[in-house]
Image: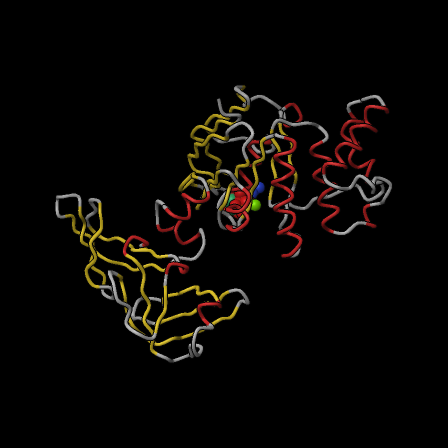
Amino acid sequence: DPIIRIENICKTYPGGVQAVNNVSLNVNRGEFFALLGPSGCGKTTLLRMMAGFEIPTSGTLLIDGQNMADVQPNKRPVNMVFQSYAVFPHMSVAQNVGYGLKIEGRPKKEIAERVQEALDLVKLGHLGGRMPDELSGGQRQRVALARALIKRPSVLLLDEPLSALDAKLREAMQIELVRLQKTVGITFVIVTHDQDEALSMANRIAVMEQGVVKQIAGPAELYESPNCRFVADFIGKINLFDGQAKANGNGKTLVETPVLGKVEFGGDANGPVSLGVRPEKVRVSREKPSGNLLAAQGPVTDIAYYGGYSKVFVDIGAKEPVLADITNAERSMGPGFENGEKLWVSWRAEDT
Ligand code: ADP
Ligand code: MG
C-alpha cells in the first residue's frame, strides 16, 4: 500500500484562490517523488497539506493508512524542510540539529548519539561545534536536512530545498540527496520548479499546472511520452508543429501540418493535434537528407555554443524556429554553420 494516498484534494484560500484543484495521487513507500510545475501552480500548498500546515477544503489525505483529517502537524509521521532553511542563529550546529529531541525530553546521551548520526549522514560530522554564521549556504542546507532527519520520519517533505544554492552546488546536492534517500530508505517528496532537477532525482514525478496534476510518471516516460502539450513543453525543450489529424479507420492517422506536409502515424486521432520532436533528435545538414525522414529547409537564425554541444535554430516557416541540439563533434566536421545559411533539418517520423 502507498505511504501517502491523496484523494480528490482541493484547497481554496480565503479570498478565493483555488490553489489545488481535485488532486489525487499516491506516493509509494520508499520512493523519491517530485511535485513539479511552474511557480504558483500549487506545489507548496499540496506539500503543506501533507505536513498539516494547511487544511484541505475538501478531499482525503491518508498517511500510512491513517486519515490525517484530525492529526496535528507534530503528530504526523512526516517532517518538512522549508524553502528558506532557517536555523537558530544563537545555537551551534549540534544544538540546532538536536533541538527537536531536546523538546521531546530525550536523554542527553541519546540526543548526542543521534545528532552525530544525523550530521554524519549529511557529511557535517566534523562541524557540530560550529555556529550557523560560520557555515556556507550549502552547509546550512545540510543542517536543515539533519534536523529533519533526526526525528526519523516516515516521509521527508522538501520544498525547493536547493533553490538558494548556486548551479554547481545544486547539481552536487541533487546527487547527494538521491544517495541520502537511498541510505536512509525513507520516502522523499520534493517540490521543485526545475524540470532537470525532478528528472535527475525522482523515481516518479507529478507535473502540475494551475492546481491540477497533468501527468504522473517516471522521468523517461514523461520525457518520451508526455500526455499533453503542457507536459511536453514543460519537461525539457520540444519543437511543436500544429496540424490536423485524420484517422483512416485502419489504425493509421494522417497528420497534415503547413510546414511538414502530410505524415502518417499509427493510432486513431482526429482534429487538431501537435507534432513534437525533441531537439536532440533533430539533425542539421547542408545537403538534402536522404531516407525516410521528415525534413524541411530554411535559414539559420541563431547558433549558441555550450562547450559540449551547440543549439542551432533554423527557421522553416513554423511558428518558431526549429531547435536542433548537435554535439560539437558533429559540428566540427567540416566548416561551421553560420547565421543566415540555409540548412536542412530532419528527423525520423518515429521520433515525432
Ligand atoms: P507554488 O508552490 O507551486 O509556487 P503555491 O502553492 O505557493 O504555489 O501557490 C498556489 C496559489 O495559491 C498561488 O496563486 C498563490 O498566490 C496562492 N496562495 C498561496 N498561499 C496562499 C495564502 N496563504 N493565501 C492566499 N493565497 C495563497
Ligand atoms: Mg512553492
In the image, taking residue 141 as reference, residue 126 lies left or right, namely right
In the image, taking residue 91 as reference, residue 74 lies left or right, namely left
Q: Quadrant of residue 100?
A: top right
Vertical relation: 255 (above or below) 36 = below
Vertical relation: 90 (above or below) 115 = below
Residue at (71% x, 45% y) in the render:
141
**Front position in the image: 333 or 3:** 333
Considering every residue shown, the one lying at the far top of the view is 66
**Front position in the image: 316 or 88:** 316
**Horizontal and vertical percent position of residue 114:** 78, 28
Which quadrant of the rendered structure holds the C terminus? bottom left
**Horizontal and vertical percent position of residue 140:** 74, 46
Residue at (56% x, 36% y) in the render:
189
**Front position in the image: 322 or 160:** 322
In the image, taking residue 350 as reference, residue 37 lies left or right, namely right
Residue at (47% x, 25% y) in the render:
60
Residue at (79% x, 32% y) in the render:
115
**Horizontal and vertical percent position of residue 308:** 53, 64
**Horizontal and vertical percent position of residue 77:** 62, 25
